[in-house]
Image (cartoon, rainbow, N blue to C red):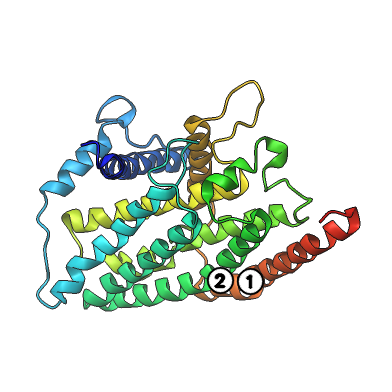
Amino acid sequence: MNAHPEILRLLAFLAGLIIFAALNAAYLVWLERKVCGHIQRRIGPKEVGPFGLLQPLADGIKLMTKQVLVPPQVDPVLFRLAPALVLIPAIMSFVVIPFSANLVAREINIGLLLVFAFASVNVLGLLLGGWGSANKYAVISAARCVSQNVAYEIPMLITVITMVMITGTMNLNEIVLQQPDISQWYVFRFTASPLMPVAFLVFFICSLAETNRAPFDLGEAESELIAGFHTEYSGMGFGLFFMGEYANIVIGASLATVLFLGGWQSPVSFIPGGWWWFLAKVYFLIFTIMWIRWTYPRTTLWGLLNLSWKVLIPISLLNLLVTGGMLKLMPLIFGAG
Protein backbone atom coordinates (compact mmCIF):
# COMPACT_ATOMS: atom_id res chain seq x y z
CA MET A 1 0.00 0.00 0.00
CA ASN A 2 2.79 2.43 0.91
CA ALA A 3 4.58 1.79 -2.40
CA HIS A 4 1.75 3.09 -4.52
CA PRO A 5 0.10 6.03 -2.71
CA GLU A 6 0.06 8.22 -5.83
CA ILE A 7 -1.67 5.53 -7.92
CA LEU A 8 -4.31 5.05 -5.23
CA ARG A 9 -4.77 8.81 -4.98
CA LEU A 10 -5.26 9.09 -8.76
CA LEU A 11 -7.75 6.21 -8.78
CA ALA A 12 -9.71 7.86 -5.97
CA PHE A 13 -9.72 11.17 -7.86
CA LEU A 14 -10.85 9.47 -11.09
CA ALA A 15 -13.71 7.73 -9.28
CA GLY A 16 -14.70 11.06 -7.74
CA LEU A 17 -14.48 12.82 -11.13
CA ILE A 18 -16.73 10.21 -12.78
CA ILE A 19 -19.31 10.70 -10.02
CA PHE A 20 -18.94 14.48 -10.33
CA ALA A 21 -19.42 14.31 -14.14
CA ALA A 22 -22.60 12.24 -13.75
CA LEU A 23 -24.14 14.42 -11.01
CA ASN A 24 -23.00 17.59 -12.75
CA ALA A 25 -24.74 16.59 -16.00
CA ALA A 26 -27.90 15.56 -14.15
CA TYR A 27 -28.28 18.75 -12.13
CA LEU A 28 -27.12 21.12 -14.85
CA VAL A 29 -29.99 19.74 -16.93
CA TRP A 30 -32.29 20.51 -13.98
CA LEU A 31 -30.79 24.00 -13.64
CA GLU A 32 -31.10 24.61 -17.37
CA ARG A 33 -34.77 23.65 -17.33
CA LYS A 34 -35.36 25.94 -14.35
CA VAL A 35 -33.48 28.85 -15.95
CA CYS A 36 -35.37 28.28 -19.20
CA GLY A 37 -38.68 28.15 -17.34
CA HIS A 38 -38.14 31.40 -15.43
CA ILE A 39 -36.81 33.27 -18.47
CA GLN A 40 -39.91 32.18 -20.38
CA ARG A 41 -42.17 32.91 -17.37
CA ARG A 42 -42.77 29.23 -16.61
CA ILE A 43 -42.00 27.17 -13.50
CA GLY A 44 -39.92 24.31 -14.87
CA PRO A 45 -39.62 20.89 -13.17
CA LYS A 46 -41.51 20.81 -9.86
CA GLU A 47 -43.32 17.48 -9.43
CA VAL A 48 -40.56 14.95 -8.58
CA GLY A 49 -39.17 15.97 -5.19
CA PRO A 50 -39.06 19.48 -3.72
CA PHE A 51 -38.59 22.04 -6.53
CA GLY A 52 -38.18 19.08 -8.90
CA LEU A 53 -34.75 18.24 -7.44
CA LEU A 54 -35.30 14.50 -7.89
CA GLN A 55 -36.26 14.87 -11.55
CA PRO A 56 -32.64 14.32 -12.77
CA LEU A 57 -32.43 11.06 -10.81
CA ALA A 58 -35.72 9.89 -12.34
CA ASP A 59 -34.44 10.82 -15.82
CA GLY A 60 -31.16 8.99 -15.16
CA ILE A 61 -32.95 5.82 -14.07
CA LYS A 62 -35.15 6.04 -17.16
CA LEU A 63 -32.12 6.33 -19.46
CA MET A 64 -30.27 3.45 -17.78
CA THR A 65 -33.26 1.13 -18.07
CA LYS A 66 -33.88 1.89 -21.75
CA GLN A 67 -32.56 -0.47 -24.39
CA VAL A 68 -29.56 0.77 -26.40
CA LEU A 69 -30.71 0.21 -29.96
CA VAL A 70 -28.19 -0.27 -32.78
CA PRO A 71 -29.98 0.29 -36.11
CA PRO A 72 -29.09 -2.25 -38.80
CA GLN A 73 -27.57 0.24 -41.27
CA VAL A 74 -25.02 1.81 -38.87
CA ASP A 75 -21.32 1.06 -38.51
CA PRO A 76 -21.49 -0.84 -35.19
CA VAL A 77 -17.90 -0.09 -34.09
CA LEU A 78 -18.02 3.67 -34.75
CA PHE A 79 -21.59 3.88 -33.45
CA ARG A 80 -20.62 2.39 -30.07
CA LEU A 81 -17.26 4.16 -29.85
CA ALA A 82 -18.48 7.73 -30.45
CA PRO A 83 -20.20 8.35 -27.06
CA ALA A 84 -17.08 7.15 -25.21
CA LEU A 85 -14.87 9.47 -27.30
CA VAL A 86 -17.03 12.38 -26.18
CA LEU A 87 -17.17 11.54 -22.46
CA ILE A 88 -13.80 9.97 -21.56
CA PRO A 89 -11.55 12.85 -22.77
CA ALA A 90 -13.79 15.30 -20.91
CA ILE A 91 -13.33 13.37 -17.66
CA MET A 92 -9.56 13.10 -18.26
CA SER A 93 -9.36 16.88 -18.69
CA PHE A 94 -10.58 17.30 -15.12
CA VAL A 95 -7.41 15.57 -13.88
CA VAL A 96 -5.33 18.76 -14.23
CA ILE A 97 -8.04 21.30 -13.28
CA PRO A 98 -7.07 22.87 -9.91
CA PHE A 99 -10.21 23.28 -7.81
CA SER A 100 -8.02 24.74 -5.04
CA ALA A 101 -4.34 24.93 -4.13
CA ASN A 102 -4.32 21.30 -2.97
CA LEU A 103 -7.44 19.88 -4.65
CA VAL A 104 -6.13 18.71 -8.01
CA ALA A 105 -5.79 15.14 -9.19
CA ARG A 106 -2.44 15.67 -10.86
CA GLU A 107 -0.45 18.91 -11.19
CA ILE A 108 1.34 18.90 -14.54
CA ASN A 109 3.58 21.62 -15.95
CA ILE A 110 1.85 21.41 -19.33
CA GLY A 111 -1.66 21.04 -17.89
CA LEU A 112 -3.10 23.71 -20.19
CA LEU A 113 -1.77 21.87 -23.25
CA LEU A 114 -3.15 18.59 -21.90
CA VAL A 115 -6.68 20.00 -21.60
CA PHE A 116 -6.66 21.17 -25.22
CA ALA A 117 -5.19 17.86 -26.39
CA PHE A 118 -8.07 15.96 -24.79
CA ALA A 119 -10.61 18.54 -25.93
CA SER A 120 -9.60 17.99 -29.55
CA VAL A 121 -10.82 14.38 -29.29
CA ASN A 122 -14.36 15.62 -28.54
CA VAL A 123 -15.01 16.74 -32.13
CA LEU A 124 -13.75 13.35 -33.35
CA GLY A 125 -16.44 11.68 -31.22
CA LEU A 126 -19.13 13.92 -32.73
CA LEU A 127 -17.84 13.23 -36.24
CA LEU A 128 -17.78 9.45 -35.73
CA GLY A 129 -21.21 9.51 -34.09
CA GLY A 130 -22.74 11.30 -37.07
CA TRP A 131 -20.80 9.38 -39.73
CA GLY A 132 -21.31 5.98 -38.09
CA SER A 133 -25.07 6.55 -37.78
CA ALA A 134 -25.58 6.38 -41.56
CA ASN A 135 -28.26 9.04 -41.18
CA LYS A 136 -28.22 12.03 -43.54
CA TYR A 137 -29.18 14.49 -40.80
CA ALA A 138 -26.50 13.12 -38.47
CA VAL A 139 -23.87 13.37 -41.23
CA ILE A 140 -24.79 17.00 -41.98
CA SER A 141 -24.61 17.72 -38.24
CA ALA A 142 -21.16 16.09 -37.97
CA ALA A 143 -19.87 18.20 -40.87
CA ARG A 144 -21.21 21.35 -39.22
CA CYS A 145 -19.59 20.42 -35.90
CA VAL A 146 -16.19 19.89 -37.53
CA SER A 147 -16.27 23.19 -39.46
CA GLN A 148 -17.45 25.00 -36.33
CA ASN A 149 -14.77 23.52 -34.08
CA VAL A 150 -11.99 24.20 -36.59
CA ALA A 151 -13.11 27.81 -36.98
CA TYR A 152 -13.36 28.55 -33.25
CA GLU A 153 -10.31 26.63 -32.08
CA ILE A 154 -8.12 29.14 -33.92
CA PRO A 155 -9.10 32.32 -32.00
CA MET A 156 -9.31 30.33 -28.76
CA LEU A 157 -5.80 28.95 -29.15
CA ILE A 158 -4.42 32.35 -30.18
CA THR A 159 -5.92 33.77 -26.99
CA VAL A 160 -4.42 30.92 -24.95
CA ILE A 161 -1.00 31.53 -26.59
CA THR A 162 -1.32 35.16 -25.53
CA MET A 163 -1.99 34.08 -21.94
CA VAL A 164 1.01 31.72 -21.99
CA MET A 165 3.18 34.62 -23.20
CA ILE A 166 1.97 36.76 -20.28
CA THR A 167 2.15 34.11 -17.56
CA GLY A 168 5.24 32.29 -18.80
CA THR A 169 3.79 28.90 -17.90
CA MET A 170 1.22 26.26 -18.89
CA ASN A 171 0.88 25.06 -15.29
CA LEU A 172 -2.69 25.93 -14.26
CA ASN A 173 -1.79 26.17 -10.56
CA GLU A 174 0.96 28.68 -11.26
CA ILE A 175 -1.36 30.79 -13.41
CA VAL A 176 -3.84 31.01 -10.51
CA LEU A 177 -1.06 31.91 -8.04
CA GLN A 178 -0.14 34.87 -10.25
CA GLN A 179 -3.61 36.36 -9.52
CA PRO A 180 -3.64 36.75 -5.70
CA ASP A 181 -6.39 39.40 -5.57
CA ILE A 182 -9.08 40.82 -7.82
CA SER A 183 -6.87 43.68 -9.04
CA GLN A 184 -4.42 41.08 -10.33
CA TRP A 185 -6.98 38.94 -12.17
CA TYR A 186 -5.87 38.83 -15.79
CA VAL A 187 -9.25 40.00 -17.05
CA PHE A 188 -8.48 43.35 -15.31
CA ARG A 189 -4.67 43.40 -15.72
CA PHE A 190 -4.31 46.16 -18.29
CA THR A 191 -0.54 46.33 -17.72
CA ALA A 192 -0.30 42.97 -19.52
CA SER A 193 -2.48 44.17 -22.40
CA PRO A 194 -5.19 46.84 -22.71
CA LEU A 195 -7.26 44.22 -24.57
CA MET A 196 -7.48 41.70 -21.71
CA PRO A 197 -11.28 42.10 -21.23
CA VAL A 198 -11.65 41.59 -24.98
CA ALA A 199 -9.46 38.47 -24.76
CA PHE A 200 -11.72 37.09 -22.04
CA LEU A 201 -14.79 37.81 -24.18
CA VAL A 202 -13.20 36.07 -27.21
CA PHE A 203 -12.33 33.04 -25.07
CA PHE A 204 -15.85 32.91 -23.63
CA ILE A 205 -17.53 33.13 -27.06
CA CYS A 206 -15.23 30.43 -28.39
CA SER A 207 -16.13 28.23 -25.41
CA LEU A 208 -19.80 28.56 -26.35
CA ALA A 209 -19.07 27.55 -29.93
CA GLU A 210 -16.69 24.71 -28.99
CA THR A 211 -19.33 23.14 -26.74
CA ASN A 212 -22.09 23.60 -29.37
CA ARG A 213 -24.13 25.86 -27.13
CA ALA A 214 -26.79 28.25 -28.39
CA PRO A 215 -26.74 30.54 -30.25
CA PHE A 216 -24.01 28.40 -31.88
CA ASP A 217 -25.73 25.00 -31.66
CA LEU A 218 -25.90 24.45 -35.42
CA GLY A 219 -24.93 20.81 -34.92
CA GLU A 220 -28.10 20.18 -32.90
CA ALA A 221 -30.49 22.41 -34.81
CA GLU A 222 -33.67 20.49 -34.02
CA SER A 223 -35.81 22.38 -36.54
CA GLU A 224 -33.38 21.39 -39.32
CA LEU A 225 -31.60 18.18 -38.27
CA ILE A 226 -34.01 16.37 -35.89
CA ALA A 227 -31.46 15.90 -33.07
CA GLY A 228 -28.19 16.26 -34.96
CA PHE A 229 -25.33 13.80 -34.56
CA HIS A 230 -27.13 11.76 -31.87
CA THR A 231 -30.38 11.29 -33.82
CA GLU A 232 -30.01 7.48 -33.90
CA TYR A 233 -28.91 7.09 -30.26
CA SER A 234 -31.11 5.89 -27.41
CA GLY A 235 -30.70 4.97 -23.75
CA MET A 236 -27.29 5.59 -22.24
CA GLY A 237 -25.72 6.12 -25.67
CA PHE A 238 -27.79 9.30 -25.77
CA GLY A 239 -27.02 9.92 -22.07
CA LEU A 240 -23.24 9.73 -22.57
CA PHE A 241 -23.38 12.44 -25.22
CA PHE A 242 -25.16 14.74 -22.78
CA MET A 243 -22.77 13.90 -19.92
CA GLY A 244 -19.88 14.76 -22.23
CA GLU A 245 -21.52 18.00 -23.35
CA TYR A 246 -22.09 19.28 -19.83
CA ALA A 247 -18.64 18.10 -18.69
CA ASN A 248 -17.11 20.12 -21.53
CA ILE A 249 -19.15 23.16 -20.48
CA VAL A 250 -17.66 22.89 -16.97
CA ILE A 251 -14.15 22.50 -18.42
CA GLY A 252 -14.59 25.61 -20.58
CA ALA A 253 -15.86 27.62 -17.61
CA SER A 254 -13.04 26.24 -15.44
CA LEU A 255 -10.37 27.31 -17.94
CA ALA A 256 -11.90 30.79 -18.18
CA THR A 257 -11.86 30.96 -14.37
CA VAL A 258 -8.23 29.83 -14.13
CA LEU A 259 -6.89 32.01 -16.94
CA PHE A 260 -8.82 35.23 -16.30
CA LEU A 261 -10.73 35.20 -12.99
CA GLY A 262 -8.17 34.12 -10.40
CA GLY A 263 -9.18 30.48 -10.02
CA TRP A 264 -9.82 29.63 -6.37
CA GLN A 265 -8.48 33.03 -5.18
CA SER A 266 -10.94 35.14 -3.21
CA PRO A 267 -12.11 38.46 -4.68
CA VAL A 268 -12.42 39.94 -1.15
CA SER A 269 -9.68 40.12 1.48
CA PHE A 270 -11.81 39.10 4.47
CA ILE A 271 -12.86 35.70 3.03
CA PRO A 272 -10.10 33.17 2.32
CA GLY A 273 -9.78 31.53 -1.08
CA GLY A 274 -10.71 27.91 -1.68
CA TRP A 275 -12.61 25.45 -3.84
CA TRP A 276 -15.91 27.20 -3.02
CA TRP A 277 -14.74 30.35 -4.83
CA PHE A 278 -13.64 28.29 -7.81
CA LEU A 279 -17.03 26.56 -8.09
CA ALA A 280 -18.89 29.85 -7.51
CA LYS A 281 -17.08 31.46 -10.45
CA VAL A 282 -17.46 28.38 -12.67
CA TYR A 283 -21.19 28.01 -12.05
CA PHE A 284 -21.76 31.75 -12.46
CA LEU A 285 -20.24 31.44 -15.94
CA ILE A 286 -22.39 28.36 -16.61
CA PHE A 287 -25.50 30.29 -15.52
CA THR A 288 -24.48 33.03 -17.99
CA ILE A 289 -24.12 30.39 -20.73
CA MET A 290 -27.67 29.18 -19.99
CA TRP A 291 -28.97 32.74 -19.87
CA ILE A 292 -27.49 33.36 -23.34
CA ARG A 293 -29.03 30.15 -24.68
CA TRP A 294 -32.56 31.10 -23.71
CA THR A 295 -32.19 34.77 -24.69
CA TYR A 296 -30.65 34.80 -28.16
CA PRO A 297 -31.96 32.97 -31.26
CA ARG A 298 -29.83 30.43 -33.10
CA THR A 299 -27.54 32.02 -35.67
CA THR A 300 -27.07 30.86 -39.26
CA LEU A 301 -24.16 28.66 -40.34
CA TRP A 302 -22.52 31.35 -42.47
CA GLY A 303 -23.04 33.90 -39.71
CA LEU A 304 -21.40 31.51 -37.27
CA LEU A 305 -18.33 31.00 -39.46
CA ASN A 306 -18.07 34.66 -40.44
CA LEU A 307 -17.99 35.66 -36.77
CA SER A 308 -14.90 33.54 -36.26
CA TRP A 309 -12.97 34.12 -39.48
CA LYS A 310 -13.81 37.81 -39.94
CA VAL A 311 -14.11 39.08 -36.36
CA LEU A 312 -12.68 36.87 -33.62
CA ILE A 313 -9.50 35.73 -35.39
CA PRO A 314 -8.43 39.31 -36.34
CA ILE A 315 -9.20 40.52 -32.79
CA SER A 316 -7.25 37.66 -31.19
CA LEU A 317 -4.29 38.27 -33.54
CA LEU A 318 -4.35 41.98 -32.68
CA ASN A 319 -4.33 41.12 -28.99
CA LEU A 320 -1.38 38.77 -29.57
CA LEU A 321 0.59 41.51 -31.34
CA VAL A 322 -0.25 44.14 -28.70
CA THR A 323 0.68 41.78 -25.88
CA GLY A 324 3.98 40.81 -27.56
CA GLY A 325 4.80 44.48 -28.11
CA MET A 326 4.07 45.37 -24.48
CA LEU A 327 6.13 42.47 -23.18
CA LYS A 328 9.06 43.79 -25.20
CA LEU A 329 8.58 47.50 -24.60
CA MET A 330 7.59 47.60 -20.90
CA PRO A 331 11.03 46.45 -19.63
CA LEU A 332 12.72 49.04 -21.87
CA ILE A 333 10.41 51.84 -20.71
CA PHE A 334 10.81 51.06 -17.00
CA GLY A 335 14.41 49.91 -17.23
CA ALA A 336 13.75 46.38 -16.00
CA GLY A 337 15.70 43.34 -17.20
**Left or right relative to 188: residue 90:** left
Q: Which residue is mark 1?
A: 313
- Which of 263 and 208 lies nearest the eye of the viewer? 263
9 versus 108 height, above or below: above
Q: Secondary structure at mark 2?
A: helix
Q: Is residue 130 visible?
A: yes
Which amino acid type is shown beneath numbered disc 2?
Answer: Ile
The numbered dot on residue 248 is none
Residue 285: % across, % down = 53, 44
Report which quarter residue 178 is drawn in. top right
The location of residue 143, given as percent across then percent down, is 38, 77
Quarter holding the N terminus?
top left
Q: Amino acid at mark 1?
A: Ile
Q: Which residue corresponds to the image point at 59% horizontal and 50% vertical from the top-left?
A: 259
For the question of whether residue 215 can be seen, the reply is no
Residue placed farthest to the front in the image?
3
Q: Are marks 1 and 2 in contact (CB under 8 Å)?
A: yes
User: Going by the image, does 44 lie left or right of 116?
Assistant: left
Q: Which residue is mark 2?
A: 154
**Considering only vertical position in the picture, is 335 above or below 281?**
below
The image position of residue 109, as x and y in percent, is: 50, 54
Identify which residue is drawn at 68% across, 70% down: 317
Number of other residues with Cα within 10 Å of mark 2, as a class: few under 14, some 14 to 19, many 20 or more: some
- SS for dot 1: helix
